[in-house]
Image (cartoon, grey):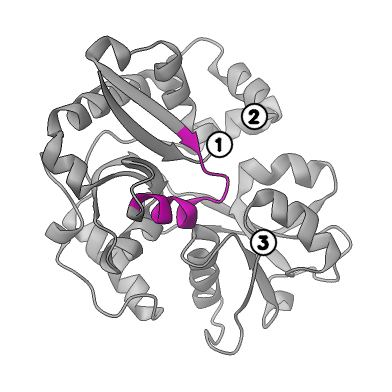
Amino acid sequence: MKTIQIGGVPEHFNLPWYLTLRNKEYQEQGINLRWKDYHGGTGQMNKALREREIDMAVILTEGIVRDIVNGNPSKIVQGYVKSPLVWGIHVAKNAPFETLEALKGTKAAISRFGSGSHLMAYINAQQLGWDLEKDLQFEVIQNLQGAIEGLPAGRGDYFMWEKFTTKPFVDQGVFRLVGECPTPWPCFVIAVREEVLKLDTASVKTILEIINTTTIEFKNIPSIDQMLANRYGQQLEDVRKWLSITQWSQEQLSNVEVARIQNTLKALDLIEAPKDPSEILHFF
């Protein structure tokens, strides 16, 4: 049996992977797919791909595109979630900031450089018309737990993370939500190390076929909203709202989408020069 290591964030988007693993669907096809949670998100997974700690990743689109352009020997094999990610912009409960404009020039808490929380801070600043050199500062806090502990203690002033993941902490009074910033492109993709694509294309294709069969029907699974609420500690009404705005993908990104992402990253000085989409995307 072939073993393939895959990484992803321990969030509601990835419940389809949990279900297919629980049902041993990969094992039935001779694949020992081993899932690893990455609480540090995209930056941590990019590092794991580069260091061959994992073979595949379910990862934020802008983060893996930037890292491939910067030398990560991986390629995107397919989209995973085609709807935007709604990033919540959070501050500590007792922080003095009431508006997004009040955050201008303050410190963004980020999981690590190259992470989604890092890249989206740039996109948010650009959308607000800030000076990207003068008005952006960063404080590395590793992960969501780091923000929960750090923001009330003054380590960073605001924190961007997926809105529904952080909603329980807003409800508990740890954070206040002061704004939102949706990604201007499909939010999650599946990336695979090039070495694995060369040596075992068949297994990668089988994995995609299995996960796609599940994501197509995911919203129709009986009581899926209750399962999500219970597993991820969220309110049922929040889960239902999230399900209503989330669309999974079973298709590859387009060259146009990749060009748009790279052009945005270039405009923000987050990459030096765009690459041809053929260097970023893998088509079977």
Assign the C terminus to one quadrant of the image: top left
As drawn, the residue found furthest toward the right would be: 94
- Within 10 angstroms of label 1, few (less than 14), some, or many (20 or more) residues? some
Query: Which amino acid type is marked by label 1?
Result: Glu
- Within 10 angstroms of label 3, few (less than 14), some, or many (20 or more) residues? many
Spot occupied by residue 119 in the image (x, y as percentages of width and height) = 48, 66
In the image, which residues are magenta?
36-49
Identify the secondary structure beneath mark 1: loop
Query: How far apart, in angstroms, are the residues tagged by discs 1 and 2?
Result: 7 Å
Query: Which amino acid type is marked by label 2?
Result: Tyr
Q: Is residue 47 magenta?
A: yes
Residue 238 picture quarter: top right
Q: Is the C-beta separation of discs 3 and 2 under 8 Å?
A: no
Residue 149 picture quarter: bottom right
Spot occupied by residue 164 in the image (x, y as percentages of width and height) = 63, 41
- Within 10 angstroms of label 2, few (less than 14), some, or many (20 or more) residues? some
Residue found at x 54% / y 87%: 131
State the mark number for residue 141: 3
Q: Which residue is mark 1?
A: 11
Mark 3 / mark 1, whichever is N-terminal: 1
As displayed, is residue 271 above or below residue 48? below
Spot occupied by residue 283 in the image (x, y as percentages of width and height) = 12, 44
Q: Which residue is mark 2?
A: 232
In the picture, measured across the screen, residue 18 lies left or right of residue 228, that is left
State the mark number for residue 249: none
Query: Which amino acid type is marked by label 3?
Result: Ile
- Between 282 and 44, the residue placed more toward the observer is 44
Identify the secondary structure beneath mark 3: loop
